[in-house]
Image (cartoon, grey):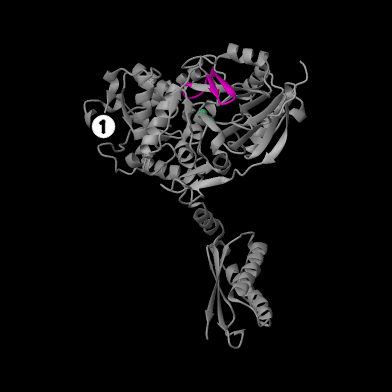
């Protein structure tokens, strides 16, 4: 290869997906063009009061609006498509390329969120080849927990970048095979940078095949004496297919409940990914002829979401479907950290009404079952044989473990990049170096506030919830320039400190008194100065004593 004079550095970065499982958003940007791969959301943990979604900061994309050529979607899971309604409001996306099932789910989502912007969605498959600005994009099929999952190969003037998307190497999948030969071909012809799924980097061995899962499901079916109520993610199409298989082989009938469950199954049936004979489907209104021992209810709400079907069935507000003794309820409850309390509430209700509740089964493995364990990660790295490697889709410790796995198959340490959201890599003439850092912090979405303007409000709520509030009341005689009584310190949200609290507030009060008196010796002091002094003294004091950062609210009453 001769010497190439080049002047077109390519930036590669994530706006979401690094240091977290969620809001996957990866970008490839040259001097003139920019493409985005995936636009996911993250679901907030319990301690984010009132937050419905977390999305990335799109400021950098707004600043580069003119360069944006396309959004490519790897598959139809929320952590890859969930932010599309927010993204298309923030920036103009000329075209979204998505596999068939993901495309149907995206259209549904845009309709539900009443997005009026015109969005051009084009379907691709494993044979597609797409030119997006100066980038040439091709695809390879992978196995995952939803059909129609792809990895993406991007050829640029400076080298080739490949992302696996979410995948596992399932040799006996429920749907189509992973294209191992094509992957090996791509590797053989040279990959400069590989981005790969790190979710299961701590799991030894090989992720069990979907085909093995059927035995565990059959076992649950065998043991359930009465109705079997199964709540699972509507996005786990492969698992839904297995549940339906078991329903058929156990001569049961199935009732499908919950809007997203009904929608997903409808599309998956239409595209041939799920096969259900119409004769076994019942609705809540026409299931009276079915014996309890012959019934399966498939529903949403495995996270204890209060408005989802399972919660409503549990609290008796679901029309014509209530819990009776003899019911067996199966949960897929582990995936999203922070929902523990809501799930417990539902489990307690179900148990009180006489159901047998199973929370720990093959179903609670759902999140991990679609992702590659360590042996698969090694094989993946061997096949692609990349010059440089960047682990993605995982919390920091998962990325780090994945980096270690890359070392075991011979990728040099200095060619491995464990990055955070916003960090950029620069690819130039098949070489990679570190670049600048872009803004990429979390943006919180509250209810229908599609623009994320409530982020500041939510930070306040979070402070109040985690760290409480301290208000300090000062009575000031501004003519005499002195306090008429000692500062009154009132705390909210410090209950755990009990008797000690009195002691804390007294000390805080005397510190404020001292500092404010000193300040008042200066004749030119303003109310603003006094408030700042109070904030600074009180926050330092409370942090030292309690390791918390409460919200400090100084109130000044002027006697004159
Ligand atoms: Zn996925
Ligand atoms: Zn994912």
Frontmost residue, 249 versus 492 = 492
Which residue lies at the image location 61% right of the left edge and 74% below the top edge? 530
Is 480 inside the magenta-drawn segment?
Answer: no
Q: Which residue reaches farthest bottom?
A: 480
Location of residue 506 in the rendering, given as x and y in whole percent from the top left corner? 61, 75
Location of residue 137 in the rendering, given as x and y in whole percent from the top left corner? 56, 21
Q: Is residue 185 above or below residue 387?
A: above
* Region rendered in magenta: 130-148
Residue identified by numbered label 1 = 284
Q: Is residue 207 visible?
A: no
Q: Is residue 330 visible?
A: yes
Frontmost residue, 114 versus 415 = 114
Picture quadrant of residue 168: top right
- How many numbered marks appear? 1
Is 141 inside the magenta-drawn segment?
Answer: yes
Which residue lies at the image location 33% right of the left edge and 19% below the top edge? 276
Picture quadrant of residue 399: top right
Q: Is residue 472 above or below residue 421?
A: below
Q: Would residue 218 appear left or right of 404 to someone viewing this image?
A: left
Q: Is residue 253 above or below residue 532?
A: above
Name the quarter where the N terminus is drawn.
top right
Q: Secondary structure at mark 1?
A: helix
């Amino acid at each position: 290869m001769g010497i190439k004079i080049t002047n077109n550095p390519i930036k590669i970065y994530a706006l979401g997906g690094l240091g977290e499982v969620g809001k996957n958003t990866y970008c490839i940007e040259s001097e003139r063009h920019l493409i985005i791969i995936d636009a996911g959301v993250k679901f907030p943990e319990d301690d984010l009061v009132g937050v419905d979604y977390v999305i990335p900061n799109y400021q950098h994309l707004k600043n580069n609006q003119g360069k944006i050529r396309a959004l490519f979607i790897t598959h139809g899971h929320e952590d890859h498509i969930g932010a599309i309604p927010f993204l298309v409001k923030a920036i103009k996306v000329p075209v979204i390329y998505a596999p068939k099932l993901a495309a149907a789910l995206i259209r549904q989502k845009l309709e539900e969120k009443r997005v009026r912007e015109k969005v051009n969605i084009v379907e691709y498959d494993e044979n597609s080849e797409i030119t997006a600005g100066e980038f040439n994009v091709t695809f390879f099929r992978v196995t995952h927990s939803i059909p129609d999952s792809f990895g993406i190969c991007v050829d640029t003037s400076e080298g080739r970048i490949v992302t696996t998307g979410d995948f596992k190497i399932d040799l006996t999948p429920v749907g189509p095979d992973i294209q191992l030969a094509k992957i090996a071909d791509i590797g053989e012809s040279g990959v400069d940078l590989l981005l790969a799924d790190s979710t299961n980097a701590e799991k030894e061995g090989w992720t069990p095949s979907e085909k093995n899962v059927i035995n565990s499901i059959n076992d649950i079916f065998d043991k359930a004496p009465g109705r079997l109520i199964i709540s699972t993610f509507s996005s786990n199409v492969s698992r839904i297919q297995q549940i339906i298989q078991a329903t058929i082989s156990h001569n049961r009938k199935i009732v499908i409940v919950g809007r997203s469950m009904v929608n997903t199954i409808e599309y998956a049936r239409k595209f041939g990914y799920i096969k259900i004979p119409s004769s076994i489907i019942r609705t809540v209104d026409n299931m009276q002829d079915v014996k309890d021992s012959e019934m399966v209810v498939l529903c949403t709400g495995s996270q204890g979401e209060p408005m989802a079907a399972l919660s409503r069935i549990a609290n008796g507000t679901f029309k014509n479907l209530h819990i009776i003794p003899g019911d067996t309820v199966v949960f897929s409850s582990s995936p999203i950290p922070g929902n523990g309390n809501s799930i417990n509430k539902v489990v307690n209700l179900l148990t009180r009404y006489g159901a047998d509740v199973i929370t720990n089964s093959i179903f609670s493995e759902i999140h991990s079952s679609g992702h590659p364990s360590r042996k698969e990660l090694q094989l993946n790295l061997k096949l692609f044989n990349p010059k440089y490697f960047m682990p993605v889709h995982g919390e920091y410790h998962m990325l780090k473990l994945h980096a270690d796995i890359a070392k075991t198959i011979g990728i040099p340490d200095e060619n491995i990049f464990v990055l955070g959201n916003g960090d950029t890599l620069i690819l130039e003439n098949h070489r990679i170096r570190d670049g600048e850092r872009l803004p990429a912090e979390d943006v919180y979405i509250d209810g229908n506030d599609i623009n994320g303007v409530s982020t500041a409000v939510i930070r306040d709520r979070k402070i109040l919830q985690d760290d409480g509030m301290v208000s300090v009341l000062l009575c000031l005689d501004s003519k005499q320039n002195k306090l008429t009584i000692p500062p009154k310190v009132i705390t909210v949200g410090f209950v755990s400190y009990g008797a000690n609290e009195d002691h804390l507030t007294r000390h805080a009060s005397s510190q404020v008194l001292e500092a404010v008196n000193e300040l008042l010796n200066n004749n030119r002091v303003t109310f603003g100065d006094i408030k700042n002094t109070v904030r600074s003294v009180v926050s330092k004091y409370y942090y030292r004593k309690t390791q918390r950062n409460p919200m400090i609210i100084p109130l000044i009453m002027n006697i004159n």
